[in-house]
Image: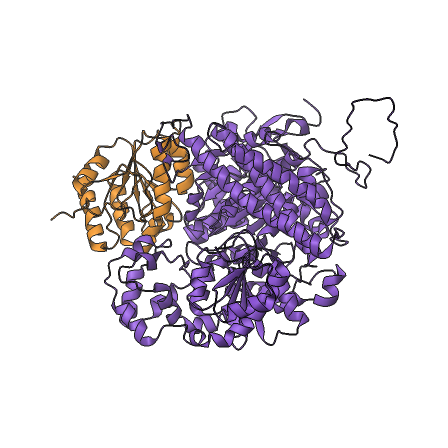
Chain colours: A orange, B purple
Amino acid sequence: MAVDTTKNAVPFEMAQIPGPEMAKTYNTKVIGSIIKKAKRPLLVVGAELFEDPVMFDKAIEIGKTGVPIAATAHTIKGFIERGYTDNVTMIGLHPLTNYLRFKDWEGLDGEGHYDEVIFMGIFYKFASAMFSALKNFNRDIKRVSIDRYYHVNANMTFGNLAFDQDAYHEAVDEVIAILKK
Amino acid sequence: MEKSSFAVEDMQNVQINIGEIVKEVEEWDQPMGPFPTPSIATLREWDFKLLNRYKVFYAPICDRCTLCTYGPCDLTGDKRGACGLDQAAQQGRIVLLAVLMGCTAHCAHGRHLYHWTLDKFGDLPFEMGDEILVDAPLTRTVTGMKPKTLKEFGPVLSYIEEEVAQLLACTHVGQEGSYMDFESKALHAGMLDSLGKEVSDMIQIVAYDMPRGDADAPLVECGMGTLDKDKAILITYGHNLAGSAEAMFYTEDNNLWGQVDIGGVCCTAIDNTRIGEGLGYPKEISEKYKDVGTKGKVAGAMGWWRKMVRAGVMDCVMVDEQCVYTDALQECSARKVPLIATNEKIMLGLPDRTNDPVDEIVDDLVNFRIPGVAIIDPIKAGEVGVRTAIGVKPNRADVRDNIFITEDEFKKYAESCTYCHSCQFVCPPHIKIGDVVQAAAEGNLEPLSSTYEICVGCRRCEQVCPQDIPILSLYAYANQEYIANHKFKMRAGRGPVKDTEIRRVGAPLVLGTIPGVIAIIGCANYPNGTKECYDIAREFVDRGYIVTTTGCMAMDMSLYTDEEGKTIWEQFPGGFDGRNICNIGSCVSNAHIHGAAIKVATIFAGRNERANYDDIADYVLSKVGACGVAWGAMSQKAASIATGFNRLGVPAVVEPHGVMYRRAFLGRTDKKEDWEVIDARDGSRVYCEPAPEHLLYVAESVEECLLMMAKLCFRPSDNNTGRMIKLTHYCDICMKYFGCMPPDWPLYVRHASELPLKWKEDMMKELEEKYGWEIDWKRKAIVVPEPGSDKPGPIRKMDVSFDPTNIERKIRVKK
C-alpha cells in the first residue's frame, strides 16, 4: 500500500508561514509523474544525506534514470565513495539557487536552463529559503520537494515524514519506481 | 581656522552665527580626501560597482508586507504592494532595517560610553601607544577626522546619528523604491556600524586602560565551572561594561574578592576581562585597578545563558544592553535571583530606584520584596550588584542547593514524554529531542550529554511540550559533571592591530604568501554547536592563516582543548601574524579587523586613508585576502557587521540559519564581463579571475564553509607563490573534506608555477586533456593564448606589476 504523503501539511518549523501561497502536498504517484514529465529536471541533494546514508543510494537510483544531480555542501564525497559521479556536479546550494533564478543561465552542463528542481536531504531552513527565492524571482521553474519535511515554499511536496523514516524511505522508493517505468 | 580678528562696523540687522570651530591647522600630513563624512549617496557609485558584480540575492522569509494600513499586501512573485513596492525592494527595506538595528545598537553603546566616561574620568587624551600611530583607521577613513581626545569622538557619533536618522527615514512608506538603492543604503549603514564600533571600543580602551594591541594579553578563566560556588556569584550580562566595571571596582576597593565572583555573559564578559591591562594610563585605573580584569571571569557566550540559569550559577544578575534574553527577569525571579537593570535600553518594567539609597535597595532585593530594580547609575548599580549577591546568597540557599531537579523528578518527566515530536518540530538545530528524552526514560543519559552543546537554549521545545516537560532542566540534570568541569582559559581581548604588525605582514598578505586573514565573528549558536567555531579556527591557524576572532566566538572556541589539555589560546601565540590567533575583543572590537585591512592599505601601500573610503575599500577588495565568518550568528548586529565588512571589500560566510538575514551578495563566474577590472597603470581593462567570487555567502555545512573561506581569500594581486599557496590550501581542503579537487580550480591558474606541487603533473594533464589548454611540456609551462584569441587557457596572463582597481580616478596614465 502506498505511503500517504499528503497528510501532515504543517511547516516543519511551525512559524514558517510565508504568506498566501503555500505548497500543496501530493502523493508519490503524482510527484513521480511530474518529475518524469519534466524536460530539464535537476535533483538537488544536501548534507542531510550523510545522516541517513541510504539516501545516497536512492539519489543515485534517481540519477541513473537520467535526472542530473547537483551535490551541494560536501555531498559529492558520498557519491565518490559509492563510485557514482556520472551526472553529479559539485556546487553550493547558494550559488546554485543564484544561477537558477537568472533566466539566461545555461545550466550545470551548459545545455540550457532547468524547468524543474527537486530538493532532497537539505537542511530545512536553508532549503525553504532557496525555494522562496525561486518562488519569488523565477517562477518558470517548478519547485518539487521529496524531502522528509513539508516544504511550504515548494509547489509540490510531501507532508511531514520526518518522524517516520521507514515511511519516508518507502515514499522515495515509490517515486523512484515511477521514474523507472 | 587660525586665531584672527575682524571688525564689525556700520552693519544693521545683521545676525552673525558662529557654529562649530573647525580646526584646520593640525598635525596631519594628509590632505583631506574626496569624501569626508559621506552622506547616503556619496559612495553610491562604489556600492553599485559592488552590487553589479555581486548580485543581490534575496530569499524572502515573509512574502507579505504588513507595515502600513494598505496592507497586508501579498508581494509574491511579480506582485507589488498598494504603495508600489515590489518584493525585491521590500526585502531590501527589511535588510536595511536589520542593518540599522545593528548599527544603532553599536553606535548607541558608544554614545552611552562617551557620556559616561566623560562624566567619570573627564576628557582623556586619545593615546594608543607608540606602536599604533594610525590610531582610529575607520574614523579617519570615513570622516576625515583625527580625534586627539575622547571628547573629539563626539562629532563622529553625531555624524553617525544624523546618517542613521536619514537612512531610517528611507524605510517609511513612499520613500525608496529600488532594491539596489536600498542595498546601497544598507551598505552605508554597515559602514556606519563599523565606525560606531570603533568609537565605542576606542573610548573604553582608553578610559579603562584596556590592552592596546597586546599579543600577550593575559589568559583569563572561562566557563561555568570557573565560578566558585563557595562565594556569592554576580553575573553581568550584555555588552556595555559601565555598570559591570563599577561592580569590579567596588569589589576591589572593598577587598571583597574572597566573597564574590563576578562572571560575565556575552561581550560584557570580554570587556570585564580587559580592564586595567593596558599601557598604564589613565592613572585612575592603572594605580587602583591594574589587572583587575584578570579577576573577572568569563561565564560564557550568550547562547549559554539559559543553560547557566538552569545550572544555577548565579546569585544576582546585572543586565546592561544588547543580546539579553528579554525573559531574563522571569527566569531569574523563578529562582530567587535578583536582577538589576543598569541601562535605559533594558528596564524590563522594573521600578527605577536610581535615586534611592543603596542600603534600602539592597535590603529590598535580598529579602525578595521585589524581583529586581532599574538603577541607571553605573556606580550605584555596581555597588548594589555586589552587595546584593553577597547578601542574598544565604537567603536563597533553599533554591541554590536544590537547583537541579531530583532523580525522581527527572524520571517522572522523562517517562511522561508521549513521543509526539512537537519539540523536534520547533528545534532550530533539529535535535531529535523525542529520542533524547525517550533514551533518558530508559536510563540512557548519553544523548542528553552529546547534544548539550548543540542545544541553543531557545526554550521553544518547552513551550510546545503538551506534557510541560522542562527539557532544559533535564539537560542540566544530565550534565552536572560537565558543568562543574567547564573550566578553560581564554586570552583577554587584545584590542587593535599594531602598525608594527601590519608592517611585518603587509607584503606577504598582499602577495598572498600569508594566505589570508580569517575573521571568526559573531555568536556561535548553530548549526552543530560551538565546537565548529573551534574547528574553523584550528583548520586555518594550522594552515598558517592569520586568524582573528571576537565576542562570543572567542569565548566558545575556548571550550575545547587538544590532547595536552591546551585551549587554542595556549596552543598558538596571539599576534596578528600567520599561525597566530588573536582575540581582538568584544563585538565592538570587530572594528579593529576593518582597521587592520585599512592599515594594510595605508601603512604598507602608502595610500592616504583620510576621507578616502572607496579608494581604501577598492584596495582591500583587490589586494587584501581576508574573509569573515559568522558561524552561528543570531542578532541584527551580525547583519550590520557583515554588511560593513562587505562595503570595505571583505567577503563573509554565514551558516545555514543565516538565510534569515534574507540577502546575500553572490558572483556569477559565467559572466566574464562582471570580472573586468582596470589596470591602474594605464587604464586598460582586464578580465580577471573571480577573486573574491562572492561577498556574502551561506554555507550549508562546516566543510563547505572551510572550502569557501579558503576560496574567498584569493585576490587578483596574489603573486605566483602566493597564488600557489592559496590554491594548495583550497585544493587540499577540498580533497580532505570533499574527496575530490574543487571543480573550478582552473579559474585561478595563471601560470604553471601556481599549481600546487603535490598535484602539479596531474593538474597540467587535466588542463590539457579536459580543458584544452596548450601545455609546453618541455618547459613544463602553460601557453597563454594571445589576447582576443578563442583558444582555451588562463583568464589572464600573470603580470607581477598588474595594479587592479575598480575606480577610474586611480588610473595613473591613461592609455
Is B423 in front, or is B656? B423
With B292 as the anchor, is B346 left or right in this view?
left
Coordinates of residue B484 in the picture (x, y in percent): 47, 73
| Residue B649 visible here | no
| Residue B440 visible here | yes
At 64% from the left and 62% from the top, the residue drawn is B379
Coordinates of residue B225 in the picture (x, y in percent): 50, 71
At 53% from the left and 78% from the top, the residue drawn is B230
Q: How many marks?
A: 0
Coordinates of residue B206 in the picture (x, y in percent): 71, 55
Is B573 in front, or is B448? B448
User: Which quadrant of the rendered structure holds the C terminus of chain A?
Assistant: top left
Task: Work out whether B346 lies above or below B490.
Answer: above
With B541 as the anchor, is B151 left or right in this view?
right
Quarter of the rendering containing residue B217: bottom right
Coordinates of residue B135 in the picture (x, y in percent): 72, 48
Task: Work out whether B224 lies above or below B553.
Answer: below
Task: Work out whether B188 lies above or below B270.
Answer: above
